[in-house]
Amino acid sequence: MNGKASFLLDLSGVSKMFQTADGTNRSVLEDVDFQLRDGEIVALLGKSGSGKSTLLRIMAGLIPADQGQVSYRGQPLYGPASGVAMVFQSFALFPWLTVRQNVALGLEAQGVSLAEREQRAENALELIGLAGFGGALPRELSGGMRQRVGIARALATDPDVLLMDEAFSALDVLTGETLRDDMLELWDERRISTRGILVVSHNIEEAVMMADRILIFASDPGRVRDEIRVNLPRPRNADSAEVRALVDQV
Ligand code: ADP
Ligand code: MG
């Protein structure tokens, strides 16, 4: 395998503009280079409005870049790739569908039977600690459980790459940390087939706890300003001196 093809995601020179209300163009991302390698968790840390979600949507193939190249496993990305799944801050569940139906929805594009979709949905729910909740409606669940459904929907597709957009920030601190640690346990124990995770966050501790590399994103326009390597073994203890020192450094 050559060097390029070994990247899960490879972005080079990615730029994006949006039109503002007065009709002028505003540069939201400028010349972003980013590689996600096999086996790593990367955190993208930046202020609100710096373009993190826009960059993630480009990587998910949901919107195109204006300039630059985006590829997934060496192939140019022209739309959503079946190996790339996303978890949203707002959960993005359909309220009129059951938990099982919401999770199975992620599999519709894959052309498998309804029975198999529902079985895989149940497996994903069990993995994330929601066995027995498949028949519930989202409104019957707490916020933390709803986001578990959002994660199950992504995991049900057996994603190669998982993109997590502020996935824990709509939850209270304890609930968010518990879910974060549960995700890390699945990853560390290789209970999911996912080969790379990109975590977008504005929470420094979350980045230090999760990532092998932290990219600091600068705004106006958004671009990668700095990179910090996190050479700490996992599982990590949030109260340890090593983690606290890194949190202070970032
Ligand atoms: P972040 O996720 O870092 O908070 P976003 O990527 O959501 O940042 O947004 C970056 C900037 O781009 C913001 O100023 C936002 O208002 C603007 N923006 C995002 N999406 C659109 C859109 N579809 N149309 C116009 N402006 C947008
Ligand atoms: Mg965002």
Image (cartoon, rainbow, N blue to C red):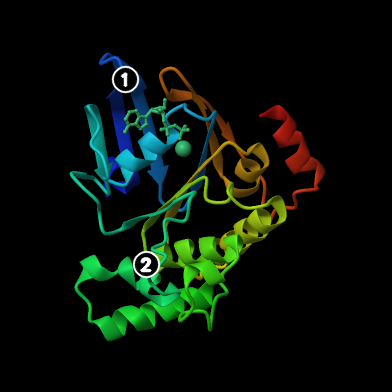
Question: Which residue is found at the position 47% from the left and 28% from the top?
Answer: 49
Q: Nearer the viewer, mark 1 or mark 2?
A: 1
Answer with the quarter of the image where residue 122 lies: bottom left
Q: Which residue is mark 2?
A: 158
Q: SS for tag 1?
A: loop
Q: Which residue is mark 1?
A: 21
At label 1, the amino acid type is: Ala
Residue 185 as seen in the image, left or right of residue 109 = right
At label 2, the amino acid type is: Asp
Question: Residue 87's x, y, as percent?
Answer: 44, 54
Answer with the quarter of the image where residue 213 lies: top right
Question: Residue 167's x, y, as percent?
Answer: 52, 50
Residue 178 as seen in the image, left or right of residue 119 = right
Q: Considering only vertical position in the picture, is 186 above or below 245?
A: below
Question: Residue 127's x, y, as percent?
Answer: 52, 74
Residues 15 and 231: in front is: 15
Mark 1 crowdedness (10 Å alpha carbons): few <14, some 14-19, many ≥20? few
